[in-house]
Each structure stands twice: as structure tokens, then as C-alpha cells.
Image: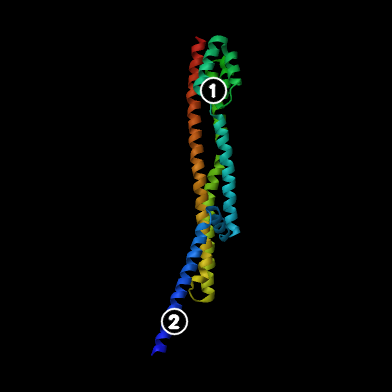
Amino acid sequence: MKKLSFTLAAAGMFVMGTSTASAAMFQDEAAAEASKGFTQVLKEQFIQGGPAFMGIVLLCLILGLAVAIERIIYLNLASTNSAKLKQQVEDALASGGVEAAKEVCRNTKGPVASIFYQGLDRAGEGLESAEKAVVAYGGVQMGQLEKNVSWLSLFIAIAPMLGFMGTVIGMIAAFQKIAAVGNLSASLIAGDIQVALLTTVFGLITAIILQIFYNYIIAKIDSIVNDMEDSSISLIDMLAAHKK
């Protein structure tokens, strides 16, 4: 009887020791995962997603960011103090005439100054010719502002589509394995499903990042275009007042 009690006690201690060791091992693994930085985790998940679709999604992100950064720099350089420019042009018209006003526009960067110069250059042909020149060159400047923005919208649309395509292909591979083996095993299809989900996640992340830049660029373009239209009206008014 004593021997049996001793055996049971030893078995209990062994089970408790095994459970404690398992818990400690699990805690160590959890601590190791927690100690990884966000960049490391993102890199590992990207690699697990597979190079085929993940590489294309990454290319969309890089090209989209390149276009967005180029447009942001261009639009910031195109933004000028229109109120100050209009005052300088008005003062130049009053003191030195059209040529002095054109010199002010030549020395000022931005689409508003370029439109002013075109209007002033046609001022000798009459207000109607000046207005037509302003409208025509305003369309040219608007096209310059919107250059390459369509590529950014294309990358926003393509990235999640590629992610969904990776998801579909991963699910097809998972079902093919199930059909080949003949039974449903979670470990058998877990890898394919993980790849499928990761491609979707990274495609959506890419689209979200580029969409934020796209909205900022469109808002900036709208602001500059409104400024161009308002300044064009002011230029025609200044020319009409100067002709009197």
C-alpha cells in the first residue's frame, strides 16, 4: 500500500513538472515573439506570403509612393502667395505698364504667375484675347498639376486585386490538397490559407497607404486650381481698369 502511494505521488510530481516545463516553454516562446520588433514581424509575414504576389504588391507600393512624393514636391513648389503676386502686378501696371507687370511674372515661380504672363502678353490685342489666353493656358497648367496622378489611382486599384488573386490561388491550392488526400486536416491546408490571407492583408495595406497620399494630392490640386481661377478673374479686372 505504501509502495502504491509512493508510486502515485511520484507520477503526480512528474505530471506537474511536465506541465510546469510546458508552461515555461510556452511563456518563453511568447516572450520571444513579443521581443520582436514590428519591422521584424512584418518582414517574416511578408516572406511567408510568398514572393510571387507579395513582390508585385510591394512593387505597386514603391512605385505609388514614388509618384506621390514627386507630386507632393511639385505641388508644394507650385503653391505661391497669390495675394502678394496680384498686388505686385497691380502696382507694376500702375507704375510701369504691361511690360513691368510681365517682368514681375517672369521673376515669380508657379502656375499663377505663368497664367498672368500669358494674359499680359496678349493684353495689347484686347481684353478678349487676354481672357482667351488665360483660359487656354490655365487648362495647360491644370494638366501639369494632374500629371501622373492617374498612375497613383491605378496602383490603389491593382494592389488589393493582386491580394485577392493571391487569396483565391491559395484557397485553390488548399482544396486541391484536400481532394488529393481525401480527408480534412487543418495542418494540411493551414500554410496555403495563411499565404492566401497574407496577400490580401498586404494588398489592402498598400491601397490604404496610397489612398491617403492620393486624397492629399487631389485636395492640393483643387486648392491650386481654385486659386488659379480666382487670380485669373482678378487679372482681367486689373487689365480692364488699366485700359480705362
Relative to 64, say whether 28 is above or below. Answer: below
Q: Residue at x 52, y 58 (%)?
A: 198
Q: Nearer the viewer, residue 48 or 89?
A: 48
How far apart in space, not on screen, are marks 1 and 2 (Cα)?
98 Å
Q: Residue at x 48, y 36 (%)?
A: 219
Q: Quadrant of the N terminus?
A: bottom left
Q: Nearer the viewer, residue 240 or 46?
A: 46
Q: Amino acid at mark 2?
A: Ala
- How many numbered markers are drawn? 2
The percent coordinates of residue 15 (x first, y second) are 44, 77
The percent coordinates of residue 158 (x first, y second) are 54, 50
The percent coordinates of residue 231 (x first, y second) are 49, 23
Residue extending furthest toward the left: 1
Per the image, the residue denoted by label 1 is 132
Q: Amino acid at mark 1?
A: Lys
Q: Nearer the viewer, residue 220 or 168?
A: 220
Element type at marker 2? Answer: helix
* Label 1 crowd bin: few (<14), some (14–19), many (20+), radius 10 Å: some
Q: Residue at x 60, y 14 (%)?
A: 99
